[in-house]
């Protein structure tokens, strides 16, 4: 697959199209949170997402191999950095505002869910789930299984885990801290120990775990398994 395969399109639905998140991405700043029904808040680092790749990000990007798909790319800092490093890379995100900002940086980005059909399925050398994106869909095993079908038979999956030992599912809403709330949607938080368990159950092998900048990362490898063989 070459960079010419990474043709942006437009198709997305879901809560990340809505308002407090879209406005924060357009502005490049928060505050912004995920709010559970019980009122617990998880801060979202919008300023970092809208900046350039930082040293912790670079520890991830330096481990990428071949073509790279960034699942939940947000404003596109990782895709832009990968392109600068010479990796053909595509970001996908359900937020039109995030995709627009990503394209503004020169990143190739597609407005689409990871659960939709994607370009290059089964051929991506590396897939990324960074910035808590293992939470997408609220079902880590379903997401890991989907990543198995997106990547090549010897594909690599680089995941940012929660910095605490947690394995939870909840319905959340995006909250701007000033009374504006987005729609409710399912989300998950997964620490490295739980991620290892979910990985084993879905056909991935943990090959490395590291910390950088107060963040936790895990590398998973398919070990030559084909998409059909992993079912």
Image (cartoon, rainbow, N blue to C red):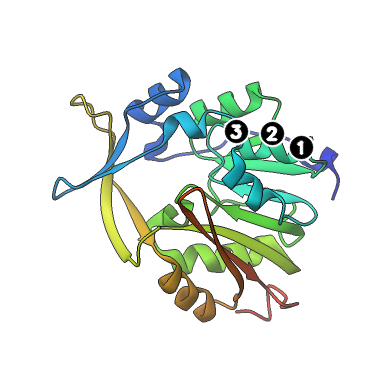
Task: Identify the residue at horizontal 23%, vertical 29% (top origin).
Answer: 177
Going by the image, does 133 lie left or right of 9?
left
**Image x and y of residue 52, in percent:** 60, 31
Place residue 148 in its image quadrant.
Answer: bottom right
Disc 3 to disc 1, C-alpha distance: 21 Å
Going by the image, does 84 lie left or right of 190?
right
Q: Residues within 10 Å of mark 2 (few under 14, many from 20)?
A: many
Q: Say which residue label 1 marks.
A: 83
**Image x and y of residue 188, in percent:** 36, 58
For residue 115, above or below residue 31: below
Q: Nearer the viewer, mark 3 or mark 2?
A: 2
Disc 3 to disc 2, C-alpha distance: 19 Å
**Image x and y of residue 87, in percent:** 79, 45
Q: Residues within 10 Å of mark 1 (few under 14, many from 20)?
A: some
Marks 3 and 2 in Cβ contact (< 8 Å): no
Give the quadrant of the C terminus. bottom right
- Secondary element at image label 1: helix
Task: Identify the residue at horizontal 66%, vertical 24% (top origin).
Answer: 105
**Residue 135 image label:** none
Q: Say which residue label 2 marks.
A: 80
Marks 3 and 1 in Cβ contact (< 8 Å): no
Marks 1 and 2 in Cβ contact (< 8 Å): yes
Going by the image, does 63 lie left or right of 66?
left
Of labels 3 and 1, earlier in sequence is 3
Q: Nearer the viewer, residue 115 or 164?
A: 164
Place residue 109 in its image quadrant.
Answer: top right
Disc 1 to disc 2, C-alpha distance: 5 Å
Of labels 3 and 2, earlier in sequence is 3
- Secondary element at image label 2: helix
Q: Say which residue label 3 marks.
A: 10
């Amino acid at each position: 697959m070459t960079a010419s395969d990474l043709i942006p399109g437009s198709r997305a639905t879901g809560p990340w199209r809505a308002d407090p998140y879209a406005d924060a991405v357009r502005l490049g700043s928060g505050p912004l949170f995920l709010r559970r029904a019980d009122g617990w808040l998880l801060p979202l680092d919008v300023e970092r997402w809208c900046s350039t790749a930082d040293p912790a990000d670079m520890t991830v990007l330096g481990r990428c191999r071949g073509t790279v798909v960034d699942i939940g790319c947000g404003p596109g800092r990782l895709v832009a950095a990968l392109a600068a490093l010479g990796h053909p890379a595509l970001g996908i995100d359900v937020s039109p505002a995030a995709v627009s900002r990503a394209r503004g940086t020169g990143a190739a980005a597609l407005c689409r869910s990871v659960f939709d059909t994607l370009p290059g399925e089964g051929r991506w050398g590396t897939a990324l789930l960074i910035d808590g994106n293992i939470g997408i869909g609220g079902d880590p095993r379903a997401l890991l299984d989907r990543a198995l079908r997106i990547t090549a038979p010897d594909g690599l999956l680089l995941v940012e885990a929660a910095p605490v030992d947690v394995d939870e599912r909840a319905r959340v809403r995006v909250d701007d801290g000033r009374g504006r709330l987005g729609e409710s949607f399912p989300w998950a938080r997964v620490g490295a120990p739980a991620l290892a368990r979910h990985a084993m159950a879905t056909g991935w092998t943990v090959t490395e775990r590291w910390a950088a900048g107060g963040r936790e990362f895990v590398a998973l490898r398919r070990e030559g398994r084909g998409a059909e063989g992993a079912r």
